[in-house]
């Protein structure tokens, strides 16, 4: 079975975010870029499906600037067979629909049983691209998948919702977005890293994929301003020596001062 | 500005997060707005939406809509939008809202302001503020020159305000056959259906400081006293002490409760990102240098095994008054 795994390249979760001089984007100077953590679960599941069935390919695709290639190489090292880099060129920012259009165009160029996404990109945190791509491809989708069983032309997925799971039966091909808990992603082996060097990354341009120039220039979500959250007030410390008194004092503060209980 | 609000129900009960979105739409439009309510047996629920701002309710009441399907529910929203021709569509950023919004947006060739924590109207256009990088920054966003503007609202942030008003106009949506390719077979709710951290007003969280899963009862005691949801740090989830559903942080849930109590959590940057927008934060930790105290409103530098039980006792005593 063939999978297309769509990845986003995002700042490491350890990153301290700084605002760039334009006041609308992040200062990228000290940022280490990683494969968005949720995408790793999608890649891992695609690799496991292929290994279990003993046939098929796993293709990874990413849209963005040159650094995306490093992330794709890492996915190749973990076992993906091939990779496609969609060069976003001068567009530093693409909205979710533009990215979905590029990914859908890549998906149409192959034959995939599964199109994988992370449940959200750890960065813009929109959780839009996966379902949007499914809509453009006219595929069914299941979002927030924590368990998957693959049948013959169908799959059954457990999806996480508030305080419960939905068990969803889905025809294939399908788009799925991966949630933590789905699996435990593997690390790249030394052999994998060596093998990845020989694998090719196909390069495409947005324009080659029929994503109109206007998509990049006229974002349907515009960032007008980016700010750090306002600093919080200094902590008010309650002495710990007498635990009973500390407990009572916390309650008093929460009731009388903060008025939250 | 004309608003249409997608209203979600589960087990015959309207979700509070949808009432929040509805109230917000009424506030932004300055008058009653339209709502769409898909489900089975939902016609009876439609009237009540008037109190939260619905002047018109488009009802899609069908057996096939008893359980959620992307196809059925997006179809209902699309049909209502076809009739209402709104300038803006609001949905709550719940699991369902996050599923419906992007599919509907892509169908209409637009994007969406996802998970906004503030929303206003400026010259007839929506302007939202949304956390990015899991709350490490916030972006002020608009919909560019999109003809249709869509936003999803973070639960628990906007008030759901009931006001007396006239009965809403009920419009029945005629939908074609609904044969979803992705179909919910069943909803598995754990026997102890727990309040989810994403929809909780108060959260009590435990981290590595609890020393082992056998000590959850200490945290649970406070959680129950406060009527809170149980949260956890990534460290204890990765250690297998509790299910991922409870994880708060950058690779867990990003939450904004009124009160967040962190017990034995040092406050890794990813955790702080996930709960930094909480209104009031209480931290209980042995280490005075723990980063959690940088964001906490109130703190106790001490042994959680001594403090937390007394805190719980004091909460119960106060509530009994």
Image (tube, coloured by chain):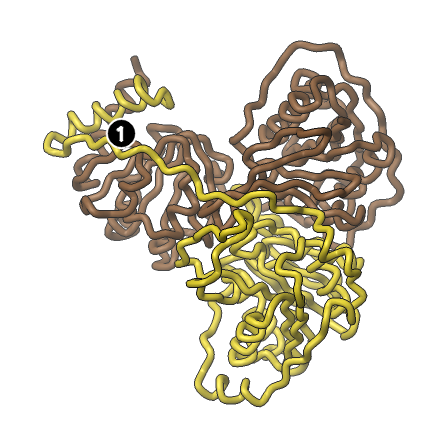
Residue at the extreme front of the image, as rendered: A21
Residue A246 location in percent, x, y?
18, 28
Residue B94 visible in the shown view: no
Residue A93 visible in the shown view: yes
- Res A234 quadrant in image: top left
Residue at the extreme left of the image, as rendered: A241
Instruction: In the rendered view, tell whether residue A2 sits above or below residue B20.
Output: below
| Figure disc tally | 1
- A7 or B37: nearer the eye? A7
- Res B18 quadrant in image: top right
Q: Which chain is brown?
A: B
- Res B169 quadrant in image: top right
Residue for point 48% across, 66% down: A33
Residue for point 63% across, 38% down: B152
Residue for point 68% across, 44% down: B112
Q: The C terminus of chain A lies in which quarter of the figure? A: top left
Q: Which residue is mark 1?
A: B312
B221 to the left or right of A57: left
A111 to the left or right of B177: left
Instruction: In the rendered view, tell whether residue A70 sits above or below residue A157.
Output: below
> Residue under mark 1: which chain is it in?
B
Residue B230 location in percent, x, y?
39, 40
Quick one: label 1, few (<14), some, or many (20+) residues within 10 Å?
Answer: many
B4 to the left or right of B189: right
Residue A208 location in percent, x, y?
78, 71
Q: Colour of chain A?
A: yellow
Q: The N terminus of chain A lies in which quarter of the figure? A: bottom right
**Element at badge 1?**
helix
């Amino acid at each position: 079975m063939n999978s297309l795994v769509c990845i986003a390249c995002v700042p490491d979760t350890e990153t301290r975010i700084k605002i760039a001089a334009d006041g609308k984007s992040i200062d990228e100077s000290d940022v280490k870029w990683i494969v968005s953590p949720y995408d790793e679960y999608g890649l891992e599941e695609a690799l496991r499906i292929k290994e279990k069935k003993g046939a098929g390919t796993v293709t990874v695709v990413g849209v963005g600037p040159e650094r995306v290639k490093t992330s794709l190489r890492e996915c190749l090292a973990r076992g993906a067979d091939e990779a496609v880099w969609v060069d976003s060129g001068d567009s530093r920012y693409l909205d979710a629909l533009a990215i979905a259009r590029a990914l859908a165009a890549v998906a149409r160029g192959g034959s995939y049983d599964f199109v994988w996404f992370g449940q959200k990109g750890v960065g813009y945190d929109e959780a839009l691209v996966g379902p949007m791509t499914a809509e453009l491809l006219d595929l069914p989708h299941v979002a927030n998948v924590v368990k998957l069983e693959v049948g013959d032309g169908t799959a059954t997925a457990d999806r996480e919702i508030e305080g419960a799971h939905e068990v969803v039966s889905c025809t294939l091909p399908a788009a799925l977005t991966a949630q933590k808990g789905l699996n435990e992603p593997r690390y790249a082996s030394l052999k994998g890293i060596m093998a990845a060097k020989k694998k090719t990354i196909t390069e495409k341009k947005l324009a080659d994929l029929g994503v109109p120039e206007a998509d990049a220039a006229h974002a349907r979500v515009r960032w007008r301003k980016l700010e750090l959250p306002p600093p919080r007030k200094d902590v008010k410390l309650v002495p710990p020596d007498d635990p009973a008194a500390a407990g009572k004092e916390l309650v008093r503060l929460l009731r009388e001062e903060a008025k939250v209980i | 500005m004309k608003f249409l609000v997608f209203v979600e129900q589960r087990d015959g009960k309207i979700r509070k997060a949808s009432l929040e979105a509805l109230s917000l739409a009424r506030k932004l439009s300055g008058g009653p707005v339209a709502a769409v309510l898909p489900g089975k047996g939902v016609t009876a629920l439609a009237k009540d939406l008037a109190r939260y701002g619905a002047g018109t309710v488009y009802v899609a009441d069908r057996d096939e809509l008893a359980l959620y399907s992307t196809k059925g529910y997006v179809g209902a929203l699309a049909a209502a939008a076809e009739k209402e021709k709104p300038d803006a569509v609001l949905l709550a950023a719940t699991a369902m809202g996050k599923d419906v919004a992007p599919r509907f947006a892509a169908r209409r060739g637009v994007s969406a302001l996802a998970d906004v924590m503030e929303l206003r109207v400026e010259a007839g256009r929506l302007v939202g503020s949304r956390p990015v990088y899991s709350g490490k920054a916030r972006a002020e966003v608009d919909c560019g020159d999109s003809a249709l503007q869509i936003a999803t609202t973070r639960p628990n942030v906007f008030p759901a305000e009931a006001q007396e008003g006239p009965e809403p106009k009920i419009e029945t949506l005629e939908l074609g056959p609904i044969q979803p390719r992705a179909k919910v077979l069943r909803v598995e709710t754990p026997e102890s259906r727990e309040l989810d951290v994403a929809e909780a007003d108060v959260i009590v969280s435990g981290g590595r400081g609890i020393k082992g899963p056998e000590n959850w009862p200490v945290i649970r005691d406070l959680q129950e006293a406060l009527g809170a949801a149980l949260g956890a740090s990534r460290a204890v989830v990765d250690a297998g002490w509790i299910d991922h559903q409870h994880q708060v942080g950058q690779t867990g849930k990003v939450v904004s409760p009124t009160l967040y109590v962190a017990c034995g959590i040092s406050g890794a940057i990813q955790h702080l990102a996930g709960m930094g927008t909480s209104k009031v934060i209480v931290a209980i930790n042995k280490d005075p240098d723990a980063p959690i105290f940088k964001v906490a409103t109130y703190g106790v530098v001490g042994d959680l095994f001594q403090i937390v039980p007394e805190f719980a006792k004091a909460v119960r005593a106060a509530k009994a008054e």
